[in-house]
Amino acid sequence: MKIAIIGSGNVGKALAKSSVKAGHKVTMTATTAEKAAEAAKATGAHAANSNQEAVTDADIVIVAVPYEKLGEVFRGLGTAVDGKVVVDVTNHINMQNPGEVLNGISNAEEIQKRHPKVHVVKAFNYSFAARMAEPSVNGTRLDGFVAGDDQAAKDKVLEFVESIGYRPIDAGPLVMARALEGMGLLIVMLQVKHSWPWQNGWKLVGPPEE
């Protein structure tokens, strides 16, 4: 597949690395052309001069930017992502008031509401960058939960999730992004509370075993 990754931070680079390893053609962008080139060189991806250029021929667009940058990114993209499969990997983290995050609409739903022509899918937000680069822990394959309202778009992302090493799991409609974002908040808070090493991942145990 042709994968466009908007964002060259730890998450963007981790997903680029695993995507290239899986044989996908990956194009990355960053806040500057220099940063994009640097990230592309480090991961084996290609660098684009702009977000719009990156998404032009993409089968899947992954938005890997901080939560507070989402509006800016989508304003810049305009209609370039209309009809595209867009994967939202963001989390809104509030350690002091987690209820503010849990008691409301998800980031993914907000994107879908504002951009109804985009096929928004939620995935990866519950994983740390280390696990996106290598979706296993001590030989155990981690689960890749995917939520979305458009089944064809979700199936494409499930295929991609499996290709980079996760066990793909259809988590249901886009409203389930609220649960996935809750999982993202929980795993972050666990690391902080228990001083864990930011290497954990989610695995649903029991049948069917895989």
Image (spheres, helix red, strand yellow):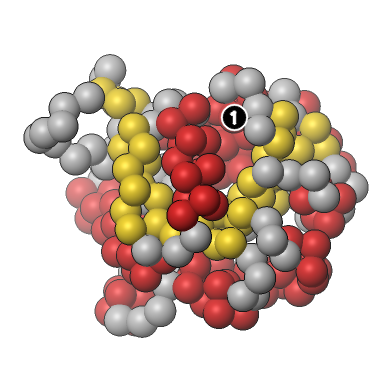
Q: Which residue is mark 1?
A: 19
| Secondary-structure class at tag 1 | helix
User: Is residue 157 toward the left or the right of residue 191 in the image?
Assistant: right
Depth check, front residue: 163 or 5: 163
The N terminus: image quadrant: top right
Q: Residue furthest left?
A: 206
Residue 2 image-quadrant placement: top right
The C terminus: image quadrant: top left
Q: Residues within 10 Å of mark 1 (few under 14, many from 20)?
A: many
Q: Across the whole image, how many numbered discs are drawn on residues?
A: 1
Where residue 130 sits: x, y (%)?
45, 34
Where residue 53 sits: x, y (%)?
86, 50
Residue shown at 80% from the left, 62% from the top: 80
**Residue 176 visible (yes or no):** yes
**Residue 8 visible (yes or no):** no
Residue shown at 85% from the left, 43% from the top: 48
User: Is residue 4 toward the left or the right of residue 46 in the image?
Assistant: left
Depth check, front residue: 180 or 168: 168
